[in-house]
Amino acid sequence: MSSGTDLDEHLSLLRRRWLLLVGCVVFGGTAGLALMRLTPPAYTATTQVLVMPVGPQEQANQVTSRQRESLNLDTEAQVALSAVVAARAARSLGLDRTEPAEVTVPPNSAVLWISVTAADPATAAAQAGAYAEAYLANRRESALTSMAEQQEAVLSKLRQVNAAIDQVIKQLDGLPRGGPQHAIATQRQGVLNRQAASLALKYDALRTVAITPGTVISQAAPPEAPSSPSLPLYLGTGLMAGLLAGSAAAYLRDRLDRRLRTPADVERLTGLPVLSDLSGPREHGALHDLSCAVVSACPGKRLLVRALPADLYASALAEPLAVSAPLVVLDGSDVRDLARADAAVLLIGLGLVSAGEVADTVRQLGRHDVPVIGVVTTTDAVPSFVPLLEPRQHGQHGPHSPLGKLVATGELEPGVSAETTPMQALHHHPRRPGKQP
């Protein structure tokens, strides 16, 4: 339940600041497109190389679900990326240095994909092919060197065995036949003869091994379209960055902006209930409902009406609306109003007051034990609460009756004159031509 509430709060924040959010998203997308236009195009060419075993000295690879070949192609990929191969490729092209290569190994294969990215399509294709040839040449040289070392080791061992055989033959000539020493020497001669035969076979096998490091199965061709910049990548990144920046800006703006622009802002930032909103189109009976809400919420008979800002009547765009109630209405003009008030209603001009000003007013009233029962928000019409002196007869609808007067009864506070309780601004505020109260 808490996570859903938090989500609703975040969505409500974004709805309040949707213009800022949309602006940041549009700016981010535009910036991504502009950056894509400013980024020079790059072309990627790929050469595919089939790697083959070159002899018994090949490093064995552990067979897994990803790699089922006997070769360790991950090691071969690192060899293809080595500085030795890069230098050989540069020398073959007559260059000081080449663009860096990228080598990938498709699963369950013995193929290396050698790719080079350059500003020119022909350059990318030429360097990718040079990398492949340099890798195969380096692999062939490494295999030949290793094979020669193995042949030299086997030949050296064979020479040692042959020398031992000659020594045993000379010993046999000086030993009497049938004696134990002659039998031991004969047995040793047989062992040495078998070792010599085995080494001779191994040496012949090494000399006849064919060195085939691999072959190019797909030559790199100059690409027709650039591989970068990518429209989805740049546009998506710009939009995502704009969305994140817009969300952060909306959150910061919402926390720093304390001005009350809508009734929802009043309830969210001040915690006071909005009894009525007169800022938009007023439905039939809205003033009646407002009066009922004020009467039901007021704990006594004396109601203090406080306008924020203080010159709300002077800044209103239209004539105030008369809202009658069976209460003693105090406007603060008398020095005794604050002490006599049982409750207070705040009239807030939307867009003219901040949450801090409302909080200061609530604290001031609270120090005098005057509770604030609610808020009435307005922009183009200001409600003026006037006491209801006598019951209104049913069917009384004349041009001189005040707009919104309630069918209600009530009594004024004993000893309080009804002529001094209405808000003075109702009588002095000029009416706009063409508008009826």
Image (cartoon, helix red, strand yellow):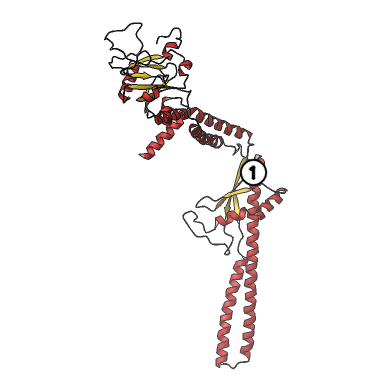
Provide residue 173's location: percent of width, then percent of height.
Answer: 63, 90
* Left or right of 235 in this view: 403: left
Relative image position of residue 308 (x, y in whole percent): 45, 23
Label 1, residues with CA under 10 Å away: few <14, some 14-19, many ≥20: many
Would you name the residue on which mark 1 appears?
A: 125
**Which is more toward the observer, 346 or 117?**
346
Reply yes or no: does residue 64 show up in magenta. Answer: yes
Main SS class of the magenta portion in the image: loop
Q: Is residue 231 above or below residue 328?
A: below
> For the residue labelled by badge 1, is the local secondary structure a helix, a strand or a loop?
helix
In front: 275, or 247? Answer: 275
Residue 422 on image: x %, y %: 38, 15
Chain part drawn in magenta: 55-66
Q: Quadrant of residue 342?
A: top left
- Which quadrant: the N terminus? top left
Q: Which residue is rendered at x = 56% and y = 78% of the image? A: 194
Counting every numbered tag in the picture gives 1
